Image (cartoon, grey):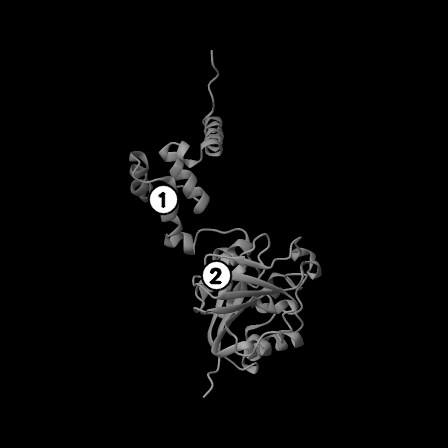
Amino acid sequence: MSRLRSPRSALRGLARRVRSQALVGGLDGLPPRAQLSVVYETLLGRKPDPSGVASYLPALQDGSLAPSELAEWIYASSEWWTVAPFTQLAPALHFSRSLFVRSLPRARRILDLGGTALGSDKGAMVLMGYPYAFDELVVVDLPPDDRNDLYKESVARNVTQTDLGPVRYNYHSMSDLTQYASGSFDLVYSGQSIEHVPVEEAERVLLGAARILRPGGYLALDTPNARVCRLQQPGFIDPDHDYEYTHGEMVDKLRQAGFDVLEAKGLNHAGGSLARGEFSVREVATNRGLFEAIEDCYLLSYLCRKEETP
């Protein structure tokens, strides 16, 4: 005679079968109710509520909604964008930075300072979703062997053709932009790079960017916010950082280099942590996106413009 199983044991057995089926056949191989549960628990961190069951389960059952389409609806929901929990800071910051990159102006010639994407020839801007075709995107970075161990790689790249245009790599310090002609770029982007050089070199970087931009050209920049990072830990958040700026310090540097600051937005809001005086990774990771309250955010981001000549 077979032994009766406890409800908890039965649930564990069902969970194992669901995981096994998902691994072998993907979500399409699961029963519709299990498909719904897996998508909800993976993307929203919770079980489906009655309204979710009523909205999606019949369509999953009759085949008019595929599990991948259900995932698209969840990704597009206000819940995923605003309250679905993130537990890791790095992917949440990457998500917010991608939103910033996608908001940048259209440009034909772009210089990306420190824009190597480890493991990809396309460069960081293309991978993060910059939306416009360009004539050329030049990535400036240190030679692979000269970088901190965190950023080393075994290859040096030359030119890569992407769907948006050619990406060319030049290996040298971002502090020396003398090889580029004055007024030859429409957009300079410094994504998480200005903090990697000493303060006096950062001033040269910004002055160099102003020189090589055409009149009316744009500088876009994002960098850690020292006010929030010092709450997270007393030292720099990256061993390769030379200086982490406050909003006031960064704006002063940008204006001294001759830029008009058009937009200043914060990435990943940390207001609750600042109010409590205690950093919460889960809170800051979950509060992803761009915010007006720049001084209360984990990252600072700026869109600046070089003054038009009379």
Label 1 secondary element? helix
Is residue 64 visible in the rendered image? The answer is yes
Q: Nearer the viewer, mark 2 or mark 1?
A: 2
Q: In the figure, 301 relative to 252: above or below?
A: above
Question: Residue 264: x percent and y percent?
Answer: 48, 72
Question: Residue flagged by tag 2: what amino acid is it?
Answer: Gly
Point out which mark residue 291 bears. none
Question: Residue flagged by tag 1: what amino acid is it?
Answer: Glu
Label tally: 2
- From the viewer's side, name the closer residue of 156 and 248: 156
Pointer 1 local density, CA inside 10 Å: few below 14, some 14–19, many at least 20: few
Alpha carbon distance from label 2 to label 1: 31 Å
Determine which quarter of the picture holds residue 89.
Answer: bottom right
Point out which mark residue 165 bears. 2
Q: Mark 1 and mark 2 in contact (Cβ < 8 Å)?
A: no
Question: Residue 124: x percent and y percent?
Answer: 54, 59
Point out which mark residue 69 bears. 1
